[in-house]
Image (cartoon, helix red, strand yellow):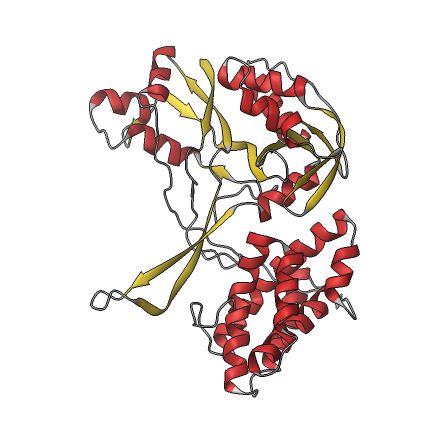
Amino acid sequence: MQTKAFFLQALTPVHPGTGQVSGSVIDLPVAREAATGFPLIPASSLKGVLRDGRTDEAANKVFGSPEQMGELTLTDARLLLLPVRSYAGTFALITCPLVLQRWRRDAEALGLSLELPQPSITGEEVLAGSAIQYNHQVILEDIDLRVKGSSEALAKAISGLLFGKEEQGLMERLALVSNDVFSYFCQTGLEVIARVRLESASKTVASGALWYEEAVPAEAVFSCFAIAKDAAHFAELHRRPYLQIGGRGQRGARFAAGAGGGIAMPQTRSQKDMKRALELVSSLEQADPELRRIYGGLCHSFPVMVLQSGLCQAVAFSADKASGEGPRARAHQKLLEHLGAILEVEGDLLAYLHEAPTTAYMHHTRRVLGAWVYFKRFARSVLKVEAGGDDEGR
């Protein structure tokens, strides 16, 4: 068997979708690894795109058919480099030790050798290229990281494997961050795109026909491996210089429940979030209709603001709107009150977030995004407010 490393660089935002998922604040999220939460492109999507609808005998031999197994096998394309907005240098290309360790392990298992440095990074440290450093820091979105050293050696190694030469953009922009920081940006650093459905007659937006779609940003790099009986089959990987990827599938979930021995099992965080969200949203069920409508719209739009601007800016936006009078101000006041209840913060939430250490801030962001799945659901079922209302996000 022959093995070849294969890389994909996104020229536009990529949506390797999963269909609608009930456990996400985004209506159409990207496909992710179950254990890590890192975005991926499923091997079946890659193979289908490379096959390009061909059903001739040669295509059946390479890609397979119902009667025979194909001679070319692909692994899932895993995220290798993720672009993230940077205060200096426009954007950084980040990776982490876990991603590099898995990449090296998989290559060695398939008989390939990857000569990569193995630096150690933890907490708020970063190895960074020259273009993205500012005052001995790398500022990514709303996260400040302390420069531990240069990423030049690692950038040279990765650039040689990807491009066969020292690619200037990668040399200047590569950042090796901790596993926790990389995981955080895999959840909060992807593009969120608003989509609408138009009425065919009036060409205006249909009522409630707004949804949000997640995409991996342009410039991201994925890595995968191709395995073939004949090295000639690798020509299929380069038959076209560009590939259009973005298929959609369906994903479900199963729940298991059990009891025995009279033992009280602890509740999961999701169970607690669901119960608390139901209590908080239901407390507004008999409120003024205008307040319910505006608050319900905020339940739909707030997690999108968090993903696009960060938790601090989203909370600051609501704090500003809450300073006035009327239903809109009261709706934002309730939103801040409910955020504080979820995060178990009393007093000034914005001041608390400003002072929170980076690790705690990342945890709070994930906590809010996880809980807000239920606020969106109960805004629909309890308050009868659908996404796409006139006041959403205002």
Position of residue 4 relative to residue 184, above or below, is above
Residue 75 or 318: which is nearer the viewer? 318
Quadrant for the N terminus in the image: top left
In the rendered structure, the answer to whether residue 356 lies left or right of residue 212 reads right
The residue at 61%/60% (across/down) is 314
Where residue 370 appears, x then y in whole percent? 61, 58
Residue 262 or 247: which is nearer the viewer? 247
Where residue 30 appears, x then y in whole percent? 47, 46
Position of residue 237 relative to residue 135, above or below, is above
In the rendered structure, the answer to whether residue 194 lies left or right of residue 48 reads right
Where residue 43 appears, x then y in whole percent? 43, 33
Q: Report whether residue 255 is seen.
A: no
The quadrant holding residue 96 is top right
The quadrant holding residue 200 is bottom left
Where residue 368 appears, x then y in whole percent? 64, 60
The residue at 59%/80% (across/down) is 282
The residue at 36%/30% (across/down) is 47
Q: How many marks?
A: 0
Residue 248 or 330: which is nearer the viewer? 330
In the rendered structure, the answer to whether residue 316 lies left or right of residue 106 reads right
Position of residue 270 relative to residue 1, above or below, is below
The residue at 66%/55% (across/down) is 365
The quadrant holding residue 189 is top right
Q: Report whether residue 250 is seen.
A: yes
Position of residue 112 relative to residue 27, above or below, is above
